[in-house]
Image: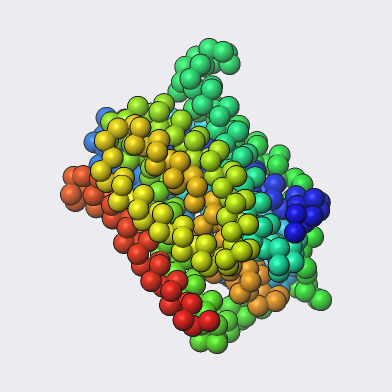
Amino acid sequence: MNSALTRRPVVAWALYDWANSAFATTVMAGFFPIFFKQYWSVDVEATVSTFRLGLANGAGSFLIALLAPLLGAMADRGGARLRMLAFFTLVGAAMTAGLYWVQQGDWVAAALVYAAAGIGFAGGVTFNDSLLVDVADAGEYDFVSSYGYSLGYAGGGLMLLLNVAMVSSPGSFGLTGAAEAVRLSYPMVGGWWLLFSIPTLMWVREQKPARPLPIASAAREGWRELRATIGAVRQLRPLVWFLLAYWMYIDGVNTIIKMAVDFGLSLGFPQQSLIVALLVTQFVAFPAALAFGWLGGRIGARNGIFIAITIYSVGTVAAYWMNSIGDFYLLAVVIGLVQGGIQSLSRSYFASLVPPGKQGEFFGFYNMMGKFAAVLGPLLVGVTALLTGSPRAGILSVIVLFAGGAALLWKSRSES
């Protein structure tokens, strides 16, 4: 099993997680929520900026969620999953770098550019996920998927560590202040993303159809096959129940990732301490993701997911009663223990359910559910906080998503 991790295609595939996780950590979970609240939404009440952040997180996710299955079907028929990966990577990296030029107070421009970057991120994830079955054998899915997430947490954590050092001591880097350091982090992330995507594009080889189609024909054939797949879902009941379960529980996971820093700011915790907590999560998640890969191989990926959902649920309830930055650090450790595990085991378990030759299309469905989840979760937190006037009530609302996901995952067990 471990020998798989030395194969060049596996390493190259996993490096894409290393590459794009800089966006997930420095931008999505770290600096963007803080900068959006304090720089692009300056002098606005906390609940209003939280609502705006929910909109920014949801907009791009909604668009890519609608398109992902069709794009995947087209890529399958045209043998173009690597080309689609390259396209979305370029879009995501360029838009991330573009945040550098958004002026203070212009929250609309910041939201639009960030949404475009999120589309690139989501599209890249979709097609890289679909390549798991091209670089690993079925018995290797759990561990190879966990290997990718583990490298992702390490790479994203290293970039965030550098960016935090720049913000903490801008003079040491020849910068005029913390705001310039944050702005500069965006093109740095874009460059990191592009650089470490090169091995994936060079060394991963997708399994192409016997007769790849031109783009126009692939679009027509992809649309036809997508409609046929939707019409045949009754024959794939375990997969469908899992997708519904994934939609619910990964919504909770994505919401915690995207809104945790905003929640801490709303409680009055120092932003520097919140970024440190985010770093703690990253570096705890690095070995924990590998451990979950091992666990999935011993007790099954689905049982590992149940364990992670339970821990997330307990952590969400604990967050409601949080009173100190020490509590926030403790919760960061707990989340780090399961965050990579639930993501990696979900990816590997779904890969085991995908019919041969339909990787792009079905991982399009998989990531569609994840992106629709990214629409619902942040909006749920934002609207709940706005209506109740309580950020604590907003974060507690996430428990509904974990409970629903667990129930549907149990249903998928009964349909297997």
Q: Image point 52% across, 31% down: which residue?
A: 100
Where residue 271 appears, as percent x and y from the top left, is 38, 29
Q: Image point 39% across, 42% down: which residue?
A: 331
Q: Going by the image, does 42 lie left or right of 286? A: left
Q: In this view, does 217 lie above or below 314?
A: below
Q: Is residue 201 above or below residue 412?
A: above
Where residue 64 appears, as percent x and y from the top left, is 51, 60
Residue 51 visible in the snapshot: no
When asked about the image quadrant of residue 162, the answer is: top right
Q: Image point 66% across, 70% down: which residue?
A: 359
**Residue situated in front as seen by the camera: 340 or 13:** 340
Q: Going by the image, does 57 lie left or right of 341? A: left
Residue 50 visible in the snapshot: yes
**Residue situated in front as seen by the camera: 394 or 106:** 394
Q: Is residue 410 above or below residue 86?
A: below
Q: Quarter of the image for the N terminus: give it.
A: bottom right
Q: Image point 24% across, 52% down: which residue?
A: 384
When asked about the image quadrant of residue 328, the answer is: top left
Numbered circles on residues, count:
0
